[in-house]
Image: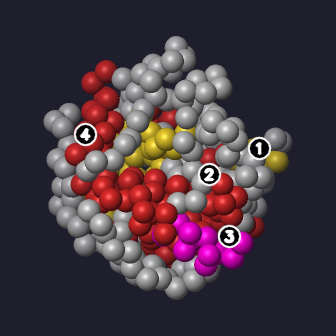
Amino acid sequence: MRRKHLILMAVVAVVLCLAVFGGLVLAQHDRVGTSRAAPAPSASPGFAAYEYMVALSDGIGSRVAGSPQEVAAAGYVKDTLTDLGYAPSVQSFSAKVDGKTIHSQNVIALKDTPSEDVVVIGAHYDSVKAGRGAFDNGSGIGLMLELAQEFTSIDTPYDLEFVAFGSEEVGKGADYFVSHLTADQKSHLRLMVNFDSVAAGDQLCAYSPGGAKKWPRMEFQQIARRLGLDVQTNPGLNKTYPYGTTGDWSDHVPFRKAGIPYLYIEATNWLIGDKDGYTNNAKYGEIWHSPKDTVAWIETVFPGRMMLQLSAADATFREFLTLALPTP
């Protein structure tokens, strides 16, 4: 199925489903390619994220840690952020994976404000070999880039540090980033937002730690409800993962271990399988880490779902990221 037709299918489905957005008018866009030019601003949340996702997954394909395709993806993210007006830096690192040395990089861009407080907005751009990494994690990178685009003209009460992590699938990029933060940097890092596989699973979900650090999830879900959007969380049916939390399998983990609150967004289904959130869909099982992880397959089976979930996440973050942080 041609990429142009996939986007048209998604837009038609969103027009039918997004009454909650008060009849937002979708802007017209040209065919998506690997061009790094930023999509035109749209009244519809999620449209630019969708185009960025397609450029990564269809334009580059699977992006295995340490591969030339992963390098190309890092370059795409860096160039896109540059075109949006940022001055991104590259944090290179090497790591041992299955006895071999791989080379990877994190791409970092800062929206600077007078505040000393920082919120990291992160997503990993690598993928496994199976599929094309649309869901995991072209969707997360797409959402991060759309927010970077939007917040060039939206004021925030703290710095936004956009970080595209390399080699998440082998557990490297975020760990390297956190391990190289100074004590002063950690003291000002108030929240880590993690986008990992945010569009394709049955239900858009938000997680945070328990106890006093659950505030990001609570605030995010409250905003979503006010907007008429459905954002769920882990119901706690698997006792290994208490209500509202999630497991140690993504870029939020080193931040959590450093004592930094996190807000983790993904799309999955906690009511099926082992009730651990790992099985994304009631009918087809796991979409990530499988040949099903392509825009073509997902749009054919779930037309409009990816756009709908990207729209919901982006619309909620437009408000969430303008709120004052709680007192430490």
Name of the residue lying farthest toward the right: 99
Residue 66 seen in the figure: no
Question: Mark on residue 134?
Answer: none
In the picture of the structure, the residue carrying the numbered disc 3 is 58
Asked if residue 41 is among those painted magenta in the image, a careful observer would answer: no
Distance of label 2 from label 4 (alpha carbons): 26 Å
Identity, as a three-letter code, of the amino acid under mark 3: Asp
Query: Residue at point 40% right, 46% down?
Result: 193
Question: Mark 2: which amino acid?
Answer: Asp
Dots 1, 3 in contact, CB < 8 A = no
- First reached walking from the N terminus: tag 1 or tag 2: 1
Which portion, as a residue range, is magenta?
1-11
Q: Are marks 4 and 3 in contact (CB under 8 Å)?
A: no
SS at circle 1: strand
Which labelled disc corresponds to residue 97? 1
Secondary structure at badge 2 equals helix
Q: Secondary structure at mark 4?
A: helix
Q: Label 2, label 3: how many angstroms apart (C-alpha)? A: 13 Å
Of badges 4 and 1, nearer the viewer stands: 4
Quarter holding the N terminus is bottom right
User: Which residue occupies 49% across, 75% down?
Assistant: 80
- Within 10 angstroms of label 2, few (less than 14), some, or many (20 or more) residues? many
Q: Cβ–Cβ below 8 Å for labels 2 and 3?
A: no
In this picture, residue 229 sits left or right of residue 138: left
> Quick one: 302 or 140, which is closer to the camera?
302
Which residue bears the numbered disc 2?
136
- The residue beneath circle 4 is 222
